[in-house]
Image: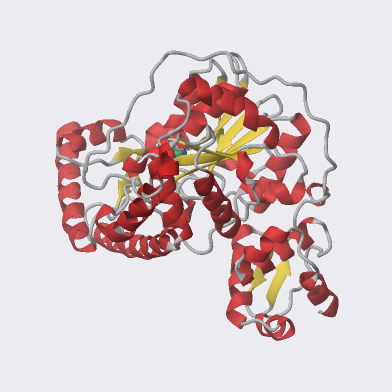
């Protein structure tokens, strides 16, 4: 116990971590100690009470830290007997030395003129991943707009990488909430993660390159990667959890490791370490799309990029984030955190595409974040979406859809219902769209299994309306099935 407490008390690795909340700081120290082999598999951790007394912090702080470490797979808890360091593959735990930079194979020339399909968000019922816009703190936002507008200096265009204050706000946010230590020079503001995905694939890929995309996964990733002429191979969520065998030649792997889209699962710590080791060994890139992780159930695991920074000096992870779900969709702002050597080529490419984004919304968002309004809003929405999910689950259980299993990991802004194997979920959703429902077919997200199902949004629907919406949906589905099974 004594040596463990000393270890956890030892000086922080970076001055930046001093800004972290107490429990995050502890998580960071434990992660370091486990990943560097200072704490061994099976080693028992002190009880929350003992450690709280030793460190002079509250028991809740230790509890929160243990909860997050458990959720991230660093420790196991056994009922009645305490917490233990998890059993992680030994060979993945050594720190890797800085490697020489690979020769520059970046591609900034193959720009296609093909336009992306634009998806319309038009207030459809039960549409997945729609923010509760009636709950958005308009007054606070207006104050931030006024502050941003008051500065004549802001009439100048923003740097190509984006408004400096917003990039700083993102750096702080990533450190506190996602366990990522970035420098603002690595952050580039984009018009959502879609643009980031697009530019990253244009930058890194040429025709014929092999790319792995998780399945199920976001269709937009397939679309942008396909435009480069790269060969896309889907990799199942199960294969990602095991040692992926056929990954060796891939130049890029795209995934949502903290919260799979749309099933919400979290990739285990062992798998995350395996993928990082694979990327390092094969000089491949990993594109981490950190989509709606803010609304996971339980503690939100740190980003893959944060883990990578603990392990490797040279980054192979490119991280994208978006404000479309956490602020409001019309804002169209997101960002990418790039490894240092990719920043310049990325900006050259970006300059050819749009020359940077409008400054006022960026600066407004920066004030929204620095004033604490963003964190408050996130917290409130997390609680609200949890209540809405519970109401939705209750309504489904009481409806004719009760036999269809919920197969996603919980939390989030939508839930996923599995349909019987032979169902035509695409046809059903097309028919539902004509009745004003924005429900999405699950099969379109998984080219490997084409498992039919429904992705049902609940985040934008008031709790009181959910029961009647589910009844209406169940009745429409019943009618559709009657016609299509005759
Ligand atoms: C998993 C995933 N990643 C990225 C995006 C793109 O988000 P943005 O609105 O920031 O372009 C979406 C949009 O639905 C998504 O579902």
> Which of 347/396 is in front?
347
How far across and down, in percent of the image, does residue 393 sit?
Answer: 31, 60
At a point 58% along the width and 57% down the height, the residue shown is: 301
Res. 454 visible in picture = no
Instruction: Determine the quadrant in which ligand 1 lies.
Output: top left
Residue 128 percent location from the top left of the image:
32, 45
Residue situated in front as seen by the camera: 265 or 148: 148
Q: Position of residue 295 (x, y in %)?
A: 44, 56
- Identify the residue shown where x is 76% and y is 73%: 44
- Residue 48 higher or lower than 304, as above or below: below
The residue lying furthest to the front in this view is 152
Q: Residue at x 83, y 49 (%)?
A: 94
Question: As rendered, which of 391 and 58 lies closer to the eye?
Answer: 58
Q: Quadrant of the N terminus?
A: bottom right
Relative vertical location of residue 395 with respect to residue 425 in this rendering, above or below:
below
Q: Is residue 482 left or right of residue 461?
A: left
Q: Left of 470 or right of it: where is 60? A: right
Which part of the image, by quadrant, shows the C terminus?
top left
Which residue shows up at 47% across the image and 25% down it? 224
- Residue 102 in view, yes or no: yes
Task: Classify residue 468 by image quadrant.
Answer: bottom left
Q: Quadrant of residue 67?
A: bottom right
Query: Where is residue 294 drawn, in percent x and y?
Result: 47, 55
Position of residue 290 in the picture relative to residue 395 (left or right): right
């Amino acid at each position: 116990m004594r040596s463990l407490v000393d270890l956890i008390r030892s000086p922080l690795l970076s001055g930046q971590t001093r800004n972290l909340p107490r429990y995050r700081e502890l998580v960071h120290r434990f992660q370091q100690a486990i990943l560097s082999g200072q704490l061994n598999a099976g080693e028992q951790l002190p009880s929350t009470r003992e450690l709280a007394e030793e460190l002079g912090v509250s028991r809740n702080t230790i509890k929160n830290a243990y909860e997050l470490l458990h959720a991230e797979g660093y420790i196991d808890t056994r009922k009645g007997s305490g917490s233990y360091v998890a059993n992680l593959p030994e060979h993945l735990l050594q720190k890797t030395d800085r490697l020489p930079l690979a020769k520059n194979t970046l591609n900034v020339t193959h720009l296609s003129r093909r336009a992306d399909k634009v998806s319309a968000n038009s207030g459809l019922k039960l549409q997945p991943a729609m923010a509760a816009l009636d709950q958005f703190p308009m007054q606070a936002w207006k104050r931030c707009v006024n502050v941003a507008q008051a500065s004549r200096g802001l009439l100048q265009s923003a740097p190509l990488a984006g408004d400096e204050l917003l990039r700083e706000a993102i750096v702080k946010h990533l450190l506190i909430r996602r366990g990522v230590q970035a420098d603002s020079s690595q952050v580039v503001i984009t018009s959502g993660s879609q643009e980031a995905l697009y530019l990253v694939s244009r930058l890194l890929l040429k025709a014929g390159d092999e790319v792995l995309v998780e399945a199920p996964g976001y269709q937009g990733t397939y679309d942008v990667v396909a435009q480069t002429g790269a060969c896309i191979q889907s990799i199942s969520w199960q294969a990602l959890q095991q040692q992926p065998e056929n990954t060796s030649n891939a130049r890029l792997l795209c995934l949502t490791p903290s919260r799979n889209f749309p099933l919400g699962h979290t990739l285990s710590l062992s798998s995350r370490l395996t993928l990082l080791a694979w990327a390092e060994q094969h000089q491949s890139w990993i594109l981490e799309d950190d989509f709606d992780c803010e609304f996971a159930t339980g503690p939100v695991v740190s980003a893959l990029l944060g883990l990578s920074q603990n392990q490797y000096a040279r980054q192979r992870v490119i991280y994208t984030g978006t404000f479309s779900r956490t602020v409001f969709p019309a804002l169209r702002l997101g960002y990418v955190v790039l490894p240092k050597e990719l920043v310049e080529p990325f900006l050259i490419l970006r300059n050819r595409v749009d020359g940077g984004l409008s400054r006022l919304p960026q600066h407004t968002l920066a004030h929204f974040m620095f004033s604490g309004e963003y964190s408050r809003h996130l917290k409130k929405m997390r609680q609200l979406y949890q209540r809405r999910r519970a109401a939705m689950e209750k309504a489904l259980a009481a409806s004719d859809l009760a036999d269809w299993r919920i197969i996603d990991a919980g939390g989030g802004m939508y839930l996923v219902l599995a349909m019987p194997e032979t169902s035509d979920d695409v046809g059903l959703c097309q028919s539902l769209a004509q009745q004003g429902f924005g429900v999405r077919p699950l099969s379109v997200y998984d080219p490997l299994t084409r498992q039919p199902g429904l992705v049902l949004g609940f985040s934008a629907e008031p709790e009181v309306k959910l029961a009647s919406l589910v009844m209406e949906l169940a009745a429409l589905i019943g009618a559709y099935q009657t016609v299509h099974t005759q």
